[in-house]
Image: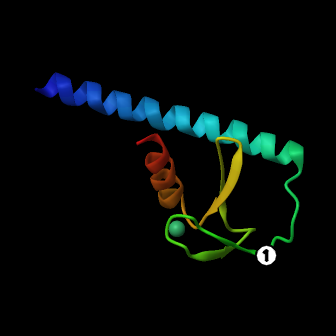
Amino acid sequence: MYRLLLILALLLLLYFLLRRAFREFKHRHLDDRGVSGDPDQMVQDPVCHTFVPRKTAFVETVGGQTYCFCSRACAAAFQQQLSR
Ligand SMILES: [Zn+2]
């Protein structure tokens, strides 16, 4: 039982590390493209429908589309919805 928990924890850790590496890669990609727009422009979070300023939004590219989220949690929820 303990071994199962350990494996689960390791998998979770690996998952987060991979996610972070992937996210950094995507952010660099976005920077290269020079995502334009007013940083104070309000963008809507597709998950909780909250409006957030672009400069503080959590930007994720999913399937070639760029989405802005209010938080990391919403971005994660959105990706989960898509992969379901
Ligand atoms: Zn949100």
Q: Amino acid at mark 1?
A: Gln
Nearer-the-camera pick, 49 or 39: 49
Secondary structure under the numbered disc 1 in the rendered image = loop
Quarter holding residue 75: bottom right
Q: In the image shown, does 13 or 31 lie closer to the viewer? A: 31
In this view, the residue farthest toward the left is 1
Residue hosting label 1: 41
Q: Position of residue 81 (x, y in %)?
A: 44, 50
Residue 40 coordinates in the image, percent (x, y): 79, 76
In the shown orientation, is residue 5 left or right of residue 9? left
**Closer to us: 21 or 59:** 59
Which part of the image, by quadrant, shows the C terminus? top left
Residue 43 at what x, y percent from top left?
70, 71
User: Does 33 appear above or below 71?
Assistant: above
Residue that appears at 10% across and 26% down: 1
Query: To which quarter of the image does residue 29 belong?
Result: top right
Residue in the picture at 68% in, 40% down: 24
Give how far across and how far down residue 79 sits, in percent.
50, 47
Q: Residue at x 50, y 60 (%)?
A: 74
Q: Residues within 10 Å of mark 1 (few under 14, many from 20)?
A: few
Seen in the picture, residue 50 relative to 25 is either above or below; the reply is below
- Residue at (74% x, 68% y) in the render: 54
Position of 32 with respect to 64 (left or right) is right
